[in-house]
Image (tube, coloured by chain):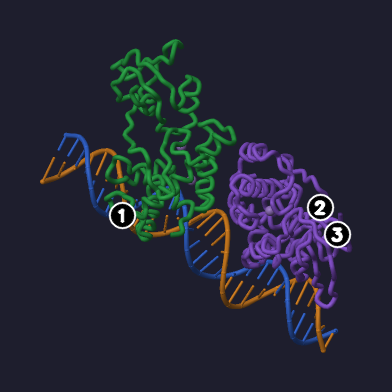
Chain colours: A purple, B green, C blue, D orange
Amino acid sequence: MNLSVSEENYIKSIYKLEEGQDAVTTNALAYELDTKPASVTDMAKKLKEKKLIAYEKYQGINLTPEGKKAALQIVRRHRLWECFLVDKLGFSWEEVHELAEELEHVRSEKLTNRLSEFLGNPVIDPHGDPIPDAQGKLGKPRTQTSLHKSQAKRLEVMAVSDKSTALLEFLNAKGIHLGTQLDVIERYSFDNSIEIKIRNQPAFTISEQVSKNIMVKPI
Amino acid sequence: MNLSVSEENYIKSIYKLEEGQDAVTTNALAYELDTKPASVTDMAKKLKEKKLIAYEKYQGINLTPEGKKAALQIVRRHRLWECFLVDKLGFSWEEVHELAEELEHVRSEKLTNRLSEFLGNPVIDPHGDPIPDAQGKLGKPRTQTSLHKSQAKRLEVMAVSDKSTALLEFLNAKGIHLGTQLDVIERYSFDNSIEIKIRNQPAFTISEQVSKNIMVKPI
DNA sequence: ATTATTATTTAGATTTACCTAAATTTTATT
DNA sequence: AATAAAATTTAGGTAAATCTAAATAATAAT
Ligand SMILES: [Mn+2]
Ligand SMILES: [Mn+2]
Ligand SMILES: [Mn+2]
Ligand SMILES: [Mn+2]
């Protein structure tokens, strides 16, 4: 199956939005891809024709097994390039998403596999997301809780679910990285903000918007 | 100036064909880009509009200074990626051109410069071609003679001017790489074939087509 | 159960990068 | 110089990926 760059971006976004939800909505996909719903409907017809998605008018979109396989290959390339940019070229985690958004479209299994090998076959990317292997298999079963939901007092940062420069730069400023261990001091039910502390640094408060996007595990 | 992938490929090909010649011909460019002359004429109008080329009907094409600057950036990216693929990922020289043809279109000065640094700021690519620096300056003045023209008896291979898999695989089979030193045993004027010898290996004969594409310097 | 709102699709255009076939210009050959 | 051949351009079209505006369907609110 030979996909255009545009088709690949759609497939990847459908894969992302499908998580949890049962069907991906036209509007959600349009928003995710920064395009218009009418364009999504057009593309949905084409991807259905190519048997990459299941789609019926007004019923939303789901990847077929082939579609999912394609998505995992794209995700693999995306995350490997992110690793390369951070580990080898010294980029910081908020800079790599956009670049990987382009590099992911160079389709060469040989290149992908050699890149993986060169990087030591990493299993997570700089944002804590798992990297599918050459067969498209994901290691982790994605059972991550957000800081927002977690009840634990001592936590370790495992991933961030939003890759926007804005969030990542905020986390940089606060000293929150992958692997950072933090203590929850207080939860304020009024606005769902959380007061946290890293080591012996002074405590500070983060909003619900932020805590929702920090994935953690108790320690 | 924001160029499409297609525009970049045109600019790069014009740069390549301009070497030596005074103006690039519509047909030559169509052949180089594996497209039709009519398409070249269309694109010529657009690139002229963008002031990247000088073009008058029936008069051929030349890069403007801005066009040349753009071309050198693309060439820089292309050749740096080729170095990366060979030096870091272990690809062989005949495999990298096609991949670099895609990677070259990721436009990020930061990425390009970090990649260059990561590679130790190489000045020639795996085919012996010089790599423009961040300012677009070429080191070597490109005064290379082809084996076909050279009069010397002992020579060193400096570059290959054709990057086709066919030629490069042929050279691999014959043991001819960058830096290979060879002796010219005989030149046959009938078909311009040349008998050469590498070290103490048995001599063999190469055709004019091949010798034209091997760039050498006397030693 | 209507009605209003929201989501989605269709109709009809636009832009980019191509193409083929025909017309035109340039260049080479009598 | 006239004619033939080759190179180039123009005219008119196509396919992909968008868009806006209008129509339709699904959902929510009276
Ligand atoms: Mn992308
Ligand atoms: Mn990532
Ligand atoms: Mn290219
Ligand atoms: Mn090269």
Which quadrant would the C terminus of chain A be assigned to in this image?
A: bottom right
**Residue at the image point whose x is 31% and y is 34% from the top:** B143
Question: Which comes before the other along the chain, label 3 or label 2?
Answer: 2
Measured as percent of width and height from the top left, residue A41 is found at 66, 63
What kind of element bears circle 2?
A: loop
The residue closer to the viewer here, B81 or B188, is B81
Displayed quadrant of residue A216: bottom right
Tag 3–tag 2 contact (CB < 8 Å)? no
Q: Is residue B98 above or below residue A194?
A: above
- Tell me the quadrant of the picture where the N terminus of chain A can be found: top right
Q: What amino acid type should be assigned to the residue bearing mark 1?
A: Ala
Disc 3 versus disc 2: nearer the observer: 3
Three-letter amino acid code of the residue under disc 2: Arg
Instruction: Name the residue carrying label 3.
Output: A154
| B85 to B6, vertically: above or below | above
Residue that label 1 marks: B54
Residue farthest front in this picture: A200
Do badges 1 and 3 share one subunit?
Answer: no
Look at label 3 and name its amino acid. Arg
Give the residue at mark 2: A142
Between tags 1 and 2, which lies in front?
2
Both marks 1 and 2 on one chain: no
Q: Secondary structure at mark 3?
A: strand
Q: Give the residue displayed 57% in from the left and 33% down from the top.
A: B91
- Residue D1 is left or right of residue B55, and the answer is left
Q: CA distance from mark 3 to mark 2?
A: 20 Å
Whether ligand 2 has any atom under 8 Å from the Cβ at mark 3 is answered as no
